[in-house]
Amino acid sequence: EAAAPRYPRRNPNIIVTGTPGTGKTTHCEALAARIQEAQADADADSPLREMRHIAVNDVVRDQTCHDGFDDALQSWIVDEDKLLDALEGDMTSTQGGCIVDWHACDLFPESWVDLVVVLTADTESLYDRLKERNYPEAKLQENMDAEIMQVLLQEAQEGFAEEVVVPLGSNTPDDMESNVDRIVSWITQWRKDHAD
Ligand code: DAT
């Protein structure tokens, strides 16, 4: 009997998604800071040492994975094929460990992804955050509707297995801290479960 194939990567790939304003950037920056700490501590056997944050917005801009800027919506017109090409090397590497923040998740092949964190926010918090960003009215309304209709959560549930999708509330700084702790615990557990 053939041996079961080894898992293709040593560290889990994580998508952090959610409507704009739910806190993707803030969460990922907090995770990136934890990763840096782990890497700076030479003695530590931290599960975070091989993790890395990939800010997809920067990839879209720097590697021109877009067909220009939509002035009305104040956002890039993203070329998803180019974006996937740009991410493929990291996401399919044996190191894995990519933490990717993006306001969609249905473009990612299921085989690239071990966890999809869907951040959610109450409409009141979200409205204030988007208002503060001076979003044009159409874009503000579109995003409020998307959050109320749970578009991102549905997209995640349609594209990925039930146990892969984890919704987390992001209304307060305390939420953020406990969410980051949960993600770190989850990474630790994943590495234990997938140890050779
Ligand atoms: P996104 O990257 O999803 O668009 P963000 O991380 O830029 O969102 O956050 C938008 C704003 O909301 C920003 O000013 C930080 C704030 N924010 C995000 N999550 C929060 C939370 N859990 N508690 C309080 N403020 C939060």
Image (spheres, rainbow, N blue to C red):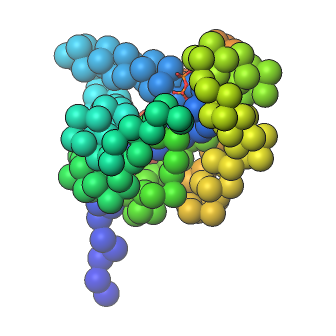
Residue positioned 39% across, 48% down in the render: 78
> Which percent across, then down, holds residue 12?
39, 46
Query: Which quadrant holds residue 179?
Result: top right
Residue 91 visible in the picture: no
Residue 53 in picture, x, y percent from top left = 34, 31
Viewport quadrant of the C terminus: bottom left
Name the residue nearer the viewer: 161 or 63. Answer: 63
- Residue drawn at point x = 75 percent, y = 41 percent: 145
Is residue 172 shown above or below 162?
A: above
Name the spot of residue 3 as percent of width and height, x first: 29, 76
Relative depth, front residue between 142 and 16: 142
**Figure quadrant of the N terminus:** bottom left
Drawn side of residue 181 relative to residue 13, left or right: right
Within the image, what quadrant is residue 157 found in?
bottom right
Relative to 45, say whether 153 is above or below.
below
Q: Is residue 110 left or right of residue 175?
A: left
- To which quarter of the image does residue 41 belong? top left
> How many marks can you see?
0
Q: Tell me residue 17's x, y (percent).
A: 54, 40
Is 154 on the left or on the right of 109, as rendered? right
Above or below, 71 against 5 in this view is above
At a point 31% along the width and 32% down the height, the residue shown is: 58
Does any portion of residue 136 appear in the rendered image?
yes
Q: Please tell me in which quarter of the rendered image ligand 1 is found.
A: top right
Q: Nearer the viewer, residue 170 or 128?
A: 128
Position of 143 relative to 177 (above/below): below
Looking at the image, the residue that sits furthest to the bottom is 1
Q: Residue at x 63, y 47 (%)?
A: 152
